[in-house]
Image (cartoon, coloured by chain):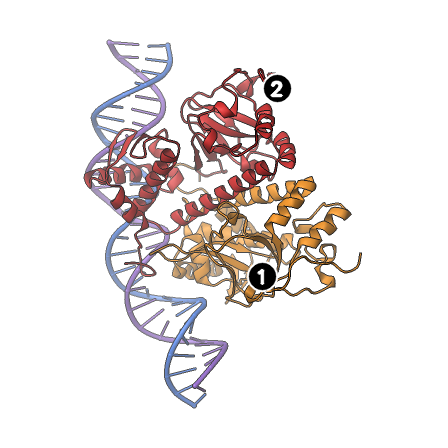
Chain colours: A red, B orange, C blue, D purple
DNA sequence: TCGGCGAGTTGATGCCGGTCAAGGCTTTTC
DNA sequence: GAAAAGCCTTGACCGGCATCAACTCGCCGA
């Protein structure tokens, strides 16, 4: 098998397509082991490969999707990172998710056939586009893919619940500790250093995501640095004392729980 | 078609099965219009019907599932209500969801094949059990069912995001206003009164769910009553001023948003 | 009938974290 | 090279809500 013929012609706008030839094959992708098609048979994998489209890369600040825009595709982050932002009338924008390479963007659009929030690139970002109707067709023929889709959505439900637990009843310190440990784990599982990494999001994004003022984020990070839990230099972060950070994140607070 | 033959024998415990004969047919169920099999063809519907099991009803306080227990089935609430509780080491239990008739419980168990939280009945509750592996098989043959499953999970993702927005950055008043309006809407869409209804959960459950102390819930409800927004008598709630409640819930607060 | 328990209410107190404000640093733009 | 715009930090202030505590009420079982 040499060239992959795709069924769709180029479009204009941020959704316009280019078709780099070789590196679009899943089996050659560095993320293969952490991505949706994991575990597919050779034949199924090439069917999967065949429905993928490759929009132009996004620059920092560019949108992958607009809130309320018609939902058509899921996207997988190939490199870079994104944030999801929910805009509510009369309220400050709320960051609800950060997406790293290998993660799937857009499941929340399926329900109403429109994108639930806007998704914005935090840096130069490449994605793979999976037109949902074609993915759904394929899910009929390939049980493994269907299972992976269910698992992936379910995993996101679990993560959201973790987030709800975090937002409801944890202190600013604990929220930030959990946030950094969560990022650390996500980097680790992608083969990046779990101890030193770059934050592609601003303090303001972190604050919005964690339900804190950006000033609080800044202050807590400064204090963590004093306490030798982490070292921070702008957006470069090193976790210095993983054990204490975990202890802090799991620490009970208040009368109902506790040591 | 007369009797439905089910593939599984009785088990013991809260999962034990009884098989009432007639009223188990989806098409006769009062919730049919709001339930998973909505829109299935006659044939598909009877296949769907055939995989449903009917565990014994739960009494108040009984568990439908235990946290970390192996995941096997989704459940649909037939009557009554439940709460999902996540227990974390050294921390107070966290209520993450309330489930009303017609809603599906258990999607978050698919990811790891274990139940993410415990699910507890808030009153006498009947459920339908859908063994997931059989549901998945059926989803292969019935695209409409597959679509409905995807949509249903996606809808839950949207709801969780709404919840995250609520927990992150809204005041106690706004959280409670949104909570009551949300319940109201859910009752309305099931044909119950959207203005007067019974709260099957305690103040403590509400507080946990909304990230507030139970005392705060009590105080805010009392104040809402003074302000003629609602009237409360124990767990009976009437919404008196829907318009103001909506205005309150959507009201911007803080420097980043408008007045 | 009594005691115990869980649920709910109400008051007093204090602190965490939001808000406002000022200033520094970096990057972008003309 | 200067101006402008983001982004981040740090300080001062104070208000919303958690916490602790005391009390009421209804329910259940002995």
Q: Is residue B35 above or below residue A39?
A: below
Give a yes or no on whether discs 2 and 1 share a subunit: no
Which residue: 46% across, 26% down? A78
Residue A143 spot, x, y in % from top left: 61, 38
Residue B230 spot, x, y in % from top left: 52, 59
Residue A93 spot, x, y in % from top left: 44, 36
Subunit bearing disc 2: A
| Res A139 visible | yes
Name the mark on residue A70: none
Element on which disc 1 rests:
strand
Subunit bearing disc 1: B
Residue B60 spot, x, y in % from top left: 53, 67
Viewer-proximal residue among B234 and B153: B153
Image quadrant containing the C terminus of chain B = top left
Tag count: 2
Q: Is residue A102 above or below residue B33?
A: above
The residue indicated by pointer 1 is B197
Specify the quadrant of the image occupied by residue B11: bottom right
Image quadrant containing the N terminus of chain B = bottom right
Viewer-proximal residue among A132 and B224: A132
| CB atoms of marks 2 and 1 within 8 Å | no
Task: Farthest residue to the right: give it.
Answer: B1
The alpha-carbon separation of the residues under discs 2 and 1 comes to: 54 Å
Neighbour class for label 1 at 10 Å: few (<14), some, many (≥20)? some
| Res B170 visible | no
């Amino acid at each position: 098998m040499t060239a992959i013929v795709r069924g769709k012609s180029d479009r204009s706008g941020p959704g316009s397509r280019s078709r780099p030839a070789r590196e679009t094959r899943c089996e050659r992708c560095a993320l293969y082991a952490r991505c949706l098609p994991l575990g597919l048979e050779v034949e199924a994998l090439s069917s999967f490969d065949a429905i993928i489209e490759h929009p132009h890369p996004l620059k920092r600040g560019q949108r992958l999707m607009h809130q309320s825009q018609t939902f058509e595709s899921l996207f997988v982050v190939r490199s870079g990172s994104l944030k999801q932002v929910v805009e509510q009338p009369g309220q400050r924008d709320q960051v609800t998710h950060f997406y790293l390479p290998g993660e799937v963007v857009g499941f929340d659009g399926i329900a109403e056939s429109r994108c639930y929030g806007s998704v914005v690139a935090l840096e130069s970002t490449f994605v793979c586009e999976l037109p949902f109707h074609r993915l759904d067709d394929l899910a009929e023929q390939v049980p493994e893919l269907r299972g992976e889709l269910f698992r992936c959505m379910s995993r996101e439900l679990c993560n959201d619940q973790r987030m709800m637990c975090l937002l409801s009843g944890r202190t600013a310190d604990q929220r930030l500790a959990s946030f950094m440990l969560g990022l650390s784990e996500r980097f680790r599982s992608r083969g990046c250093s779990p101890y030193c990494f770059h934050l592609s999001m601003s303090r303001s994004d972190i604050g919005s995501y964690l339900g804190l003022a950006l000033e609080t984020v800044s202050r807590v990070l400064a204090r963590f640095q004093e306490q030798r839990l982490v070292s921070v230099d702008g957006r470069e972060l090193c976790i210095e004392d993983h054990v204490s950070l975990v202890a802090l994140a799991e620490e009970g607070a208040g009368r109902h729980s506790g040591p």
